Amino acid sequence: MMQSVLDEAGYDASVLVDDPRFFNTAALLVTKLFLAGVDSRSGLAAKLEYQLGKAGKHRQPCTSSLSRYAIQGLPLELQPQRREQQKSSA
């Protein structure tokens, strides 16, 4: 049942070959949901799509460092006030 939920959401062998991280994350999520008591295919599929979305060629890993900046703040050279201070002092 869990395998069919993964297959229908697009997390099949092609995803496993292309990027195993997506498949492993999806499989782990479905397994945890099942162990937590979600035992219907529709419930598993809905939660999988809500958490991770559908798999496919359009799905790419996030390579942006913006999430890092959300936690750490912008580096000094990217901060607008810092650039304005440097221009006025020059």
Image (cartoon, rainbow, N blue to C red):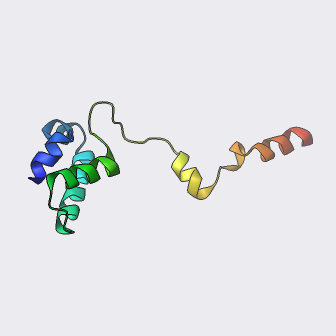
Q: Quadrant of the C terminus?
A: top right
Q: How many circles with numbers are drawn on the protein?
A: 0
Residue extending farthest to the right is 89
- Closer-to-camera residue (57/73): 57
Direction from residue 54 to residue 77 in the image, left or right: right
Q: Can residue 60 be seen in the rendering of this structure?
A: yes
Q: Where residue 55 appears, x then y in whole percent?
A: 26, 39
Direction from residue 87 to residue 68 in the image, left or right: left
Q: Where residue 5 appears, x then y in whole percent?
A: 15, 47
Residue extending farthest to the bottom is 36
Residue extending farthest to the left is 1
Is residue 65 depicted above or below 30 in this figure? above
- Closer-to-camera residue (66/12): 12
**Residue drawn at point x = 86 percent, y = 38 percent:** 87
Q: Where residue 56 appears, x then y in whole percent?
A: 26, 34
Direction from residue 14 to residue 64 in the image, left or right: right
Direction from residue 77 to residue 40 in the image, left or right: left
**Residue drawn at point x = 60 percent, y = 57 percent:** 72
**Residue drawn at point x = 28 percent, y = 30 percent:** 57
Q: Can residue 90 be seen in the rendering of this structure?
A: no
Q: Where residue 67 appears, x then y in whole percent?
A: 52, 50
- Closer-to-camera residue (42/30): 42
**Residue drawn at point x = 25 percent, y = 57 percent:** 29
